[in-house]
Every structure is written in C-alpha cells, then in structure tokens.
Amino acid sequence: MRKSALQASSAPLYTHHTCIRTRNIENAINFYSLFGYGIEVKFRAGPARAVWLTNSKESKTGQSDAASRLEIIEVPNYVLDEKEGTIKRALDLMKHETLLGLNHFALDVTPHILSLEKKEYYGLDQFLKDVNEKSKAQFGRDLNVALNPRQVVIGSQVFELCFLYDADGCIFELLRFIKDLDQNVQSGWEPWDGSGFVGGEDDENSRS
C-alpha cells in the first residue's frame, strides 16, 4: 500500500465525525440510539440546534478516540420552509446514481456481533430483526431498509452488507466481516459483469 507524505513522518489524520442535517433533532437522536449512539455534547451551530453523538463511552469529549461520532444539525423551520402538509426528506441517493460527492457512511457491526457471543448463526438479518424489534417497542416504527443484506467479496475478504434509511431518509451502510478467502485475490478493477451495482435496477426488488 502506497504511503502518503503525512504517513511517512507523522501520526495519521482521524475521521472526527460525519455530519447529517435533520428536520427534527429529537427524532434523529432517537433513531441513532438504536445503533448505540448517545449524546456527547449539545451546542448551537449558528441558529441551529446541534449535537455530537458517539457510540463510545470512554472517549474524551471532542477527541478523535471515539469508535464513531455523528454531528446532527437541525435545520430551523424558517430555513426548512416546508409547505403545509408536507415533510421534507433527504434526497434518495439509492435512486440518484449520477450525483457526485459524499454518498453514505458505514458502520461495522462485526465487533458488536462478536461481543454477543452467540452460539447459533447471527448475521445482519438477525441484527436487523433485533434492532427493528427495539425500534417498534420504543418508537412504534419499523426500520426502513434500502437494500437487504447480501454477501460481497472485496479483495480477499467476504463481507455482508445492507443499507438503511435514517429518520430523514439519509442512507447509511451496515457491514459485517465474514471471513478471509483461502486464495489471495489481487487488488484491482476487473471488467464489470453488469450486475451488483448498488442502486441499480437489480436492487429495486430488494428495498422495503
């Protein structure tokens, strides 16, 4: 793996947080609590209410030692400017494949699933079922699945992944490591076989 100039002589740069805009900050906080996120600190971003959510109980406030941190910013009503009887939603990036820029973030559920020490098989399907039951019990809502769990091979490793919509319709990924392959697969771009593109027509039937 080629090293950058920064890697050669200094500590790496860490991802501090991923920022998501919401129409209702309480709904967003409740949703991400289903995935282990709690409030680290509340603050103002100009006129908007904002919060850092983290899923690490041992992190120092504001430091980059959290397993994952989200910044949630609530768009004020006068800026949101919703027409009467309508609720604005995030652009469905599963259906807009030509848009450039940030597409999604991914949460690795592997350490969490391993920590459960399940004796029987427990994959993304089982994880989603448990989280969905928690969502119905606490908030009376089902999870909105954008892409059902499926296995993919990336390099010499096998993963299971799925995509969900959050409370505002932003997509994010759940990823579970399954195993290393016995054979060494070289990193590279093989010619596309015409299948498996997330967001394509083949995935329409996978959404619920």
Image (spheres, rainbow, N blue to C red):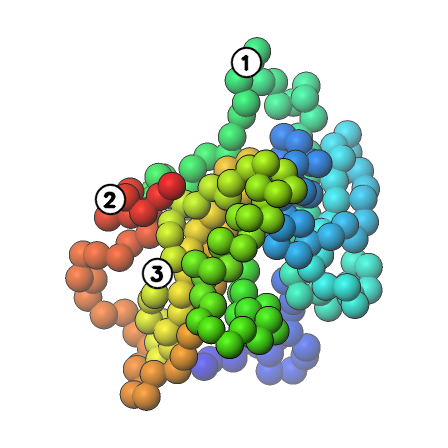
Mark 3 and mark 1 residues within 8 Å of each other at the beta carbon: no
* Cα–Cα gap, marks 2 and 1: 31 Å
Mark 2 and mark 3 residues within 8 Å of each other at the beta carbon: no
Residue 183 is left or right of residue 22, and the answer is left
Compared with 179, 202 (above or below) is above
How far across and how far down the image is residue 115, in percent?
Answer: 61, 73
Residue of label 2: 201
How far across and how far down the image is residue 42, in percent?
Answer: 81, 44
* Cα–Cα gap, marks 3 and 1: 37 Å
What amino acid is at disc 2? Glu
Mark 2 and mark 1 residues within 8 Å of each other at the beta carbon: no
What amino acid is at disc 1? Gly
Residue of label 1: 85
Compared with 35, 97 (above or below) is above
What amino acid is at disc 3? Arg
Choose top left, top right, bottom left or bottom right for residue 140.
top right
Work out whether mark 3 precedes mark 1 in sequence or the reverse, and give the earlier one.
1
In-front residue for pair 185/150: 150
In-front residue for pair 149/89: 149
How far across and how far down the image is residue 136, in percent?
Answer: 57, 41
What SS does tag 2 mark? helix
Q: Residue at x 57, y 11 (%)?
A: 84
Q: Looking at the image, how many numbered discs can be counted on the residues? A: 3
Q: Residues within 10 Å of mark 1 (few under 14, many from 20)?
A: few
